[in-house]
């Protein structure tokens, strides 16, 4: 290694010009134009620029009529994002949903009564004594779950002799709720399949546990859903993945796209990091190595809170 005795050159090595857009934010001297504010994200830098890339990818997947896999975790439905998801399903803007138990039951629970805003630092022991459950900074009284139990147990009884799968049960619950505020009412009405590979991991699982104790022959078959989910990607000209959060939801969608040699588009929104080698934190590039996202795909991960990011995506990409 040669030593350069010129201190100035050691500090500032001579550079080449970089070919790329200039970093520039929105100029509020021009007033408030929300569309242009969103457009300015492309040159703002950091996660704003990743979000702008997500806008472009989602717009293209819609223009190309890609089959859109939409995934989200339970806390998304705990939040007000539930109303945005319902809008997308009502207007047939997604083609298949993968989610978790909490995101199923809480949609139905909200048809009977609301959740409340609390705070992240409320004392858990005090809440427990009052029969209040905390989801982040949202509060769910136990009364919500008793109303859900009163509704769901007779439905399990009604359909106990049918061959149920998680997706079929969700479809039947969407039919029985008959409430236009429900995501799964619209999924039933618009023939949008909803898969929940971890259906038992929540209050709905508790209800099934109570029911099965009295009815030992009651069962829910999962392998039919696995076949239907994996077959869903076969023969599709283009597929796109829009996944909020991570865990089983993210992997279930990615794995189904493996069977067609990878999705053509992928947008992840989550706060998980890749440094523990988890699938939750994995970037799209890792999924490319497995064949779950195509080597020629357009993909991006937006690091951030979906409750902030996703309304902006819908405003930009899913206007009626």
Image: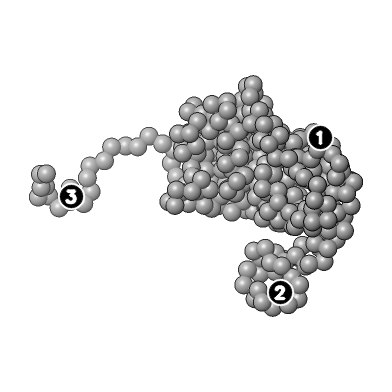
Using the image as rendered, state which of residue 21 and residue 285 is in the foreground.
Answer: 285
Tell me if I can see residue 40 in this picture: no
Residue beneath disc 3: 10
User: Mark 1, mark 2: which one is toward the viewer?
Assistant: 2
Disc 2 is placed on an element classified as helix
1 and 2 marks in contact (CB < 8 Å): no
Residue 257 position, x and y percent, is 58, 31
Q: On screen, 206 above or below 185?
A: below
Q: Quadrant of the N terminus?
A: top left
Disc 3 is placed on an element classified as helix
Q: On screen, 238 above or below 74?
A: above
Q: Earlier in the sequence, mark 3 or mark 1?
A: 3
Residue beneath disc 1: 190
Tell me if I can see residue 254 in this picture: yes
Horizontally, residue 140 falls left or right of residue 254, namely right
Q: Label 3 crowding class (10 Å Cα cut-off): few <14, some 14-19, many 20+?
A: few
User: Mark 3, mark 2: which one is toward the viewer?
Assistant: 2
Which residue appears at 65% of the width and 74% of the height? 124
């Amino acid at each position: 290694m040669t030593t350069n005795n010129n201190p100035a050159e050691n500090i500032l090595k001579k550079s080449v010009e970089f070919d790329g857009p200039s970093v520039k934010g929105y100029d509020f001297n021009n007033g408030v134009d929300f569309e242009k504010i969103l457009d300015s994200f492309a040159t703002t830098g950091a996660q704003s620029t990743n979000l702008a890339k997500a806008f472009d990818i989602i717009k293209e997947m819609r223009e190309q009529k890609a089959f859109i896999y939409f995934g989200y975790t339970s806390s998304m439905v705990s939040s007000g994002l539930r109303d945005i998801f319902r809008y997308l399903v009502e207007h047939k803007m997604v083609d298949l949903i993968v989610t978790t138990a909490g995101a199923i039951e809480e949609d139905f629970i909200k048809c009977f009564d609301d959740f409340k805003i609390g705070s992240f630092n409320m004392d858990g022991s005090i809440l427990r004594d009052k029969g209040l459950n905390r989801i982040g900074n949202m509060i769910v009284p136990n009364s919500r779950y008793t109303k859900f139990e009163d509704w769901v147990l007779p439905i399990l009884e009604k359909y106990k002799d049918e061959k149920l799968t998680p997706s079929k049960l969700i479809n039947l619950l969407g039919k029985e709720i008959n409430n236009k505020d429900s995501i799964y009412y619209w999924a039933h009405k618009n023939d949008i399949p909803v898969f929940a590979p971890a259906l038992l991991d929540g209050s709905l699982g508790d209800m099934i546990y109570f029911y099965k104790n009295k009815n030992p022959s009651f069962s829910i078959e999962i392998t039919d859903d696995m076949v239907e989910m994996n077959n869903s990607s076969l023969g599709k000209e283009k597929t796109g993945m829009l996944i909020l959060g991570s865990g089983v939801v993210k992997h279930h969608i990615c794995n189904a796209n493996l069977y067609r040699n990878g999705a053509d588009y992928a947008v992840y929104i989550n706060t998980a990091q890749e440094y523990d080698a988890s699938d939750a934190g994995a970037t799209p590039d890792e999924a490319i190595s497995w064949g779950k996202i195509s080597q020629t795909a357009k993909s991006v991960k937006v690091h951030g809170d979906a409750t902030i990011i996703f309304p902006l995506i819908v405003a930009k990409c899913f206007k009626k």
